[in-house]
Every structure is written in C-alpha cells, then in structure tokens.
Image (spheres, helix red, strand yellow):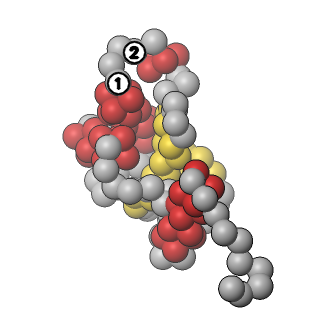
Amino acid sequence: MAYGQKILKGDAYKRAAIKRRHIRIRKRISGTEERPRLVVTRSNRHIVAQVIDDLKGHTLASASTLDASVRGAEGDKSAQAKQVGALVAERAKAAGVEAVVFDRGGNQYAGRIAALADAAREAGLKF
C-alpha cells in the first residue's frame, strides 16, 4: 500500500469520487460573459442552481429548493428539481442570459440533475 493513501468506506468514498469528478470537469468548463456556467449543487434534501460568470466571479442568477416559491411545493425531490430548473432559467433570462455551459458538479447526469437540466431547457435556456 502506498503511503499517503487513505482507505475510504461508504459515504466518504462516494463524496471523494464526486469531488474527483468535479475537479476533472472544472478543468475543461469555465463560464464566460456570453455563456456563463450553470452550476448544480445537490445534497440529500436540497438542490441549488447558480448561473456564474467565472471571468468576473459574479453570480448572475440562482434558485434553490430553499426559495419561498419552491419550499412549500408538493411532490418528490425530482419534481422540486424541475421547479428549480424552471425558476433558474426564468431568472437567467431576466438577467440577459440566453445560453449556458452545464456543470453537473461531479454528480451523475441522472435523476434530479437531469430533471433540473431538462426543465431549464424547456424554459428556454440553451445548453
């Protein structure tokens, strides 16, 4: 066994894998003024989406399940992710953003992440 290597188990292994994937993705993806980055952060209970211009370091629009309009909504977590996707697309369009680069944050493109992305596309945001 190599020195400095930790043996991770269970949830710690999953978190480390997500972190590795996120770093690998962020090497290639960067948001510009024309195409900012749509970042998705997922926890067990909530999901957050932000539209970020990396050159300026500014958040142009954001939405999450903690927003008042989504917080009391009915449905499972995928349905709430759809509402967050539509809401962030609406706010991004109001901020003058037409197209974005999608950053899934190291998570698999399935379930809540895919639901959010599909809802944002349906609301008129281009990926």
Residue drawn where x is 40% and y is 61% of the image: 101
Residue under label 2, please give it.
Answer: 73
Query: Is residue 67 shown left or right of residue 86?
Result: right
Q: Looking at the image, which residue sits at the far bottom? A: 2
Q: Relative to residue 21, is residue 57 depicted above or below?
A: above
Q: Nearer the viewer, residue 23 or 14?
A: 14
Amino acid type at image mark 2? Ala
- Looking at the picture, how far across and down is residue 21, in whole percent? 50, 68
Q: Is residue 22 visible?
A: no
Amino acid type at image mark 1? Asp
Residue 14: quadrant of the picture: bottom right
- Looking at the picture, how far across and down is residue 20, in whole percent? 56, 69
Q: Relative to residue 84, is residue 22 depicted above or below?
A: below
Residue drawn where x is 57% and y is 54% of the image: 10
User: How far apart, in angstroms, are the residues tagged by discs 1 and 2?
Assistant: 9 Å
Name the mark nearer the viewer: 1 or 2: 1
Element marked by disc 2: loop
Q: Relative to residue 91, is residue 12 depicted above or below?
A: below
Element marked by disc 1: loop
- Looking at the picture, how far across and down is residue 7, in whole percent? 66, 69
Q: Which of 83 and 6 is in front in this view?
A: 6
Q: How crowded is mark 2: few (under 14 residues within 10 Å), some or many (20 or more)?
A: few
Residue under label 1, please give it.
Answer: 76
Q: Nearer the viewer, residue 86 or 82?
A: 82
Residue 19: quadrant of the picture: bottom right
Residue drawn where x is 41% and y is 49% of the image: 97
Quarter containing the N terminus: bottom right
Residue drawn where x is 54% and y is 64% of the image: 17
